[in-house]
Amino acid sequence: MTPLFEYPRKAAFGRMLPKGKIYEHGRPRAATRELFVRQVERIVWQYKLAPETINIRGTASVPEIEIFGIALKDGELKTEVLRCIDQAIAFPILFELEHDGRVKPVAAFKRPSEADPSKWVVSGYLAGDWVSAARPRKPLPLVVDLEALYGHMLADLMPYPGRPGENLQAQVERMELIRLRQGELERCEIRLRKEKQFNRKVAINAELRNLKKELEELTR
């Protein structure tokens, strides 16, 4: 079951984040603004994990980690909303979605662009399960810097464990490739069910075997 972290009181920020500020910096399309209106009740910048608040040194790629609480109107949230917030805030963010007494952690791996360090590259989103908001939280792990802490927080959201010697970026890229291949596998299975010609079924079955083999290698 998805773990939630207990954040130090000294790191509490507790500021309401107006949607207008996000629009100003994230510059969302009209359709994304409509999602904010329809799905988001409020956004609270809950914690700021930084060297001065939790006494762990930052790094060039992870100078701070922000914890945002997003209260939802109906329990649903499109990732376009999260991506807009990530584009508006120039630090890694862990989101805690809140609805009906439950919490769900969501985050994307966020890193400075190699081409332009002033810009951030945002991966696909990783999500935990919905859990009770009253559930006891676990303490932050003992780590040497915020980059290591960020790695621990994201690792808890990944569907498959890291490999020996695999860094965070490589692990996230493998998770995204797994998700891509799983989508291809599902589409391939649909094609197979609809196909009538025997020779085409044979070809699709061969494609399925290759995809299953690749997924087996990616997930172990």
Image (cartoon, grey):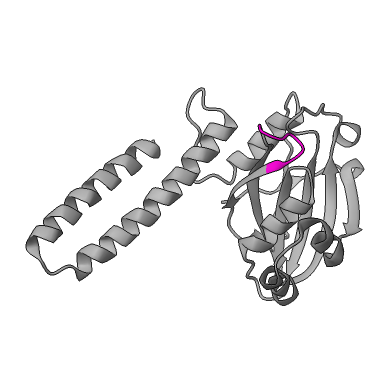
Q: Residue at x 68, y 68 (%)?
A: 32
Check the picture and name the quadrant holding the C terminus: top left
Indicate the position of residue 103 as horizontal and vertical percent values: 68, 60
191, 44: nearer the viewer = 191
Residue 112 can be seen in this image? yes
Q: Main secondary structure of the magenta part?
A: loop
Indicate the position of residue 164 as horizontal and vertical percent values: 49, 24
Residue 160 can be seen in this image? no
Indicate the position of residue 120 as horizontal and vertical percent values: 70, 42
Left or right, residue 64 beside residue 154: right
Left or right, residue 199 beside residue 177: left
Asked whether residue 91 is drawn in magenta, I would say: no
Asked whether residue 115 is drawn in magenta, I would say: yes
Quadrant in the picture for residue 105: bottom right
Q: Residue at x 58, y 57 (%)?
A: 129
Quadrant in the picture for residue 90: top right
For this orientation, the residue located farthest to the left is 198
Quadrant in the picture for residue 192: bottom left
Q: Residue at x 33, y 59 (%)?
A: 186
61, 49: nearer the viewer = 61
Marker count (numbered):
0
Q: Residue at x 59, y 52 (%)?
A: 125
Indicate the position of residue 156 as horizontal and vertical percent values: 60, 43
Q: Is residue 141 above or below residue 30?
A: above
Left or right, residue 147 beside residue 89: left
Q: Which residues are magenta?
A: 114-120
Left or right, residue 200 beside residue 14: left
